[in-house]
Image (spheres, rainbow, N blue to C red):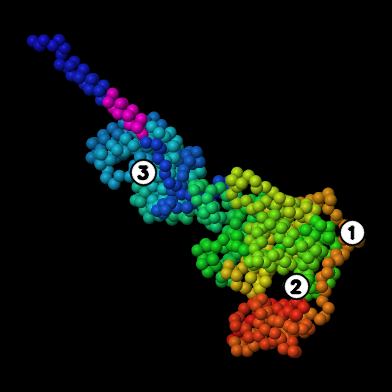
Amino acid sequence: MSDNPHPLWQRCAVAALLAGVIFIGGSYAWLVGVRAAAPPPPAIATSVEVLDRDGRLLRPFALQDGRWRLAADPERIDRRYVDMLIAYEDKRFYDHAGVDPLALLRAAWQFVTHGRVVSGGSTLTMQVARLLEPRPARTLAAKLAEMRRAIELEARLSKAEILKLYMSLAPFGGNLEGVRAASLAWFGKEPRRLTLAEAALLVALPQSPEARRPDRQPTAAGAGRHRVIERLEKTGLFGEAEARFALAADLPTARRELPNLAFHAAETARRERPTLSVHRLTIDAALQERLEALAAERMAMLEPGVSLAMVVVDNASGEVLARISGADPQDRSRAGAVDLTRAFRSPGSTLKPLIYGIAFEDGLVHPETLIEDRPMRFGAYRPRNFDLDYQGTVPVKRALQMSLNVPAIALLQAVGPQRLASRLNAAGVELKLPPGEVPGLAVGLGGAGVTLEGLTALYAAIGNGGDVHPPRRRLDDALMRPDVGSRKILSPVASWYLAQTLAGSPPPRNARGGLIAFKTGTSFGYRDAWSVGFDGLRTVGVWIGRPDGQPVPGMIGRERAAPLLFDALARIAVRPASLSAPPREALTVRNIELPPPLRRFQPHDTGIGTGKEPQIAFPPSGATLDIEPSDPVPLKIRGGEGLTVFVDGIPAGTTDASGVFLWQPTTEGFVRLTVMDAAGLADSVSIRLRTSR
């Protein structure tokens, strides 16, 4: 008989209880220690994103190793996908602390009874741990390390943050990581609104991302999607009819390109602020997309080597709504990688409206004032009209609408070239002059460089009643530069006079006039064709030419750039917004009703020709001469004494007693010939040389 009063089974039960208590207590202590010693939340690298004004993705940048990994926010992802993911992968996600014992027991039992892995026991948190710290060997030790890391993650992160990590890191085939990159690549859209079939495919792909790639393994991809839909239908997450519809949906057959809108704007934003992971631009993605499509259509019709650029600016804020340079950044023949919206080019006649605006503001002229368009000299400078003809006496508004050169230079002499340059500077338009040069009368006809972006901002100011905003490209510009605001460059009356005058400019063929105010310009030698126009809300600037600055025959603003301007405005809005109403101080009268000093403009010391100044009789300006390489070109000059000939500004020699100079050309192309007498009076012509074939 035993001395122990307790039966053996009772002693075994007590021992088992004590062992269980010790195990549970030890496990709890271990768990507490692991949680307390958990490292800080992990920081993961994600693709730099450039967004438009409404948060739409314009362009992401791949990581250095070529992977696309877009940061995910569960709040901006279709809730159905989130619910399906949790229901399929980890239905007790919100209840466990990183490891789900019930899931582990179920997986172990299925392995024992089936002899193979039927379902995994990994939670979503464990999968995140594996994605953060990949281990090549799938051993028990690796699994335990994964469980420990999952517990650490749960100690430092909320469930929403863990979901965000999974949705950013999960693999979806190839170099795609995260549900956003996957949705954009496979469906061409952000995952804010997904169909049942799309959500099911995104749930299935990370389990076997390469084996289930829909573009390479469509059968396996379809089977994976089918398995997700069948299992989740039984949970009541959706109905049978919806499941049948999803099962019949087509799979994506090819991977799409990720968004690549506003290439140059995105590149510039990233280069200017390289530490930011998200850039918010003022660009409107829908507008940018429409104008990029228009640019691609027009580029296909341009001559080899010729490119184009467009800028759209909001009149009231100065925000750049669209910015297009060329159509293909990879096209080296057209310098596709160069941002032509910020390249300095000769603006031709497009600065004339500001000259007239200052003259309106100074009270020198009114749109109905009469002005002379006759041969005039301004010192040694003798401007001529584009068509080499003169109109005589015309109203000021007609002179601007016809882009006559002599009246513009007469007004510029009256207001002063330096004032023009100062107004441009106040408008944020940088004027690029040759080294050592100061603004002269030639600036009024394109004798300086400006950018398309700056020129468009200038016209936006005219459409905004004279208030200019420096071009604003980022939504955070006001925060980064709180001193930036609008400036007054013209009075509201002068701006209204200009808008009404420019609205009367003859439109291009097959276009309706009077709806927008616009101006065209052609630089010397047919190198640049411009057109800038505005309605009551927006301003569009267009440039066409060769990026390398070579001349292009027929590159005239009215014929090449103006049609594109009108097409761009048609893509922006069905009907242009009305121009502003006249200010109360505006004087809307006929010429005869003007005060006597405003009825006719009287220029100051124009130096009207006396007949004694030199004049190039041959060749005429604008002529095309066929030449032989060995034959000289005869220049015939009338009038003047002590005549010196200049070729593109470089002295070439003096004439003989009869006023003839034999010039030996060395190359083909456009050239400017100038003759100057001893008194400094000069005459110039522009011609084109072509080798005889």
Numbered disc in front, either 3 or 2: 2
Residue at 33 percent of width and 45 percent of height: 134
Relative to 294, does residue 96 appear above or below in the rendering? Answer: above
Q: Report helix, strand or loop for mark 2.
A: loop
- The amino acid type, in three-letter code, at marker 3 is Leu
Element class at badge 3: helix
Work out whether mark 3 precedes mark 1 in sequence or the reverse, and give the earlier one: 3
C-alpha span from label 1 to label 2: 32 Å
Of the pair 544 and 509, the residue shown nearer to us: 544
Q: Position of residue 442 (x, y in %)?
A: 72, 68
Please indicate whether residue 440 sits to the left or right of residue 95 in the image.
Answer: right
Residue 125 lies left or right of residue 136; in this view the side is right
Tell me the crowding category of disc 2: few under 14, some 14 to 19, or many 20 or more residues within 10 angstroms, Cα based.
some
Vertical relation: 202 (above or below) 95: below
Of tags 1 and 2, which is closer to the observer?
Answer: 2
| Residue under label 1 | 594
Label pair 3/2, CB-CB below 8 angstroms: no
Residue 568's image quarter?
Answer: bottom right
Q: Which residue is mark 3?
A: 131
* Front of the two marks 3 and 1: 1
Residue drawn at x 77%, y 78% as measured from the top left: 679
Query: Main SS of the magenta segment?
Result: helix
Q: Residues within 10 Å of mark 1 (few under 14, many from 20)?
A: some
Residue 235 visible? no
Q: Which residue is mark 2?
A: 381
Q: Is residue 170 visible?
A: yes
Q: Is residue 478 left or right of residue 98?
A: right
Image quarter where the C terminus lies is: bottom right
Please report the bounds of the magenta region as a residue range.
25-38
| Residue at x 78%, y 75% (from the top left corner) | 389
Q: Amino acid at mark 2?
A: Tyr
Say left or right for 65 vs 350: left
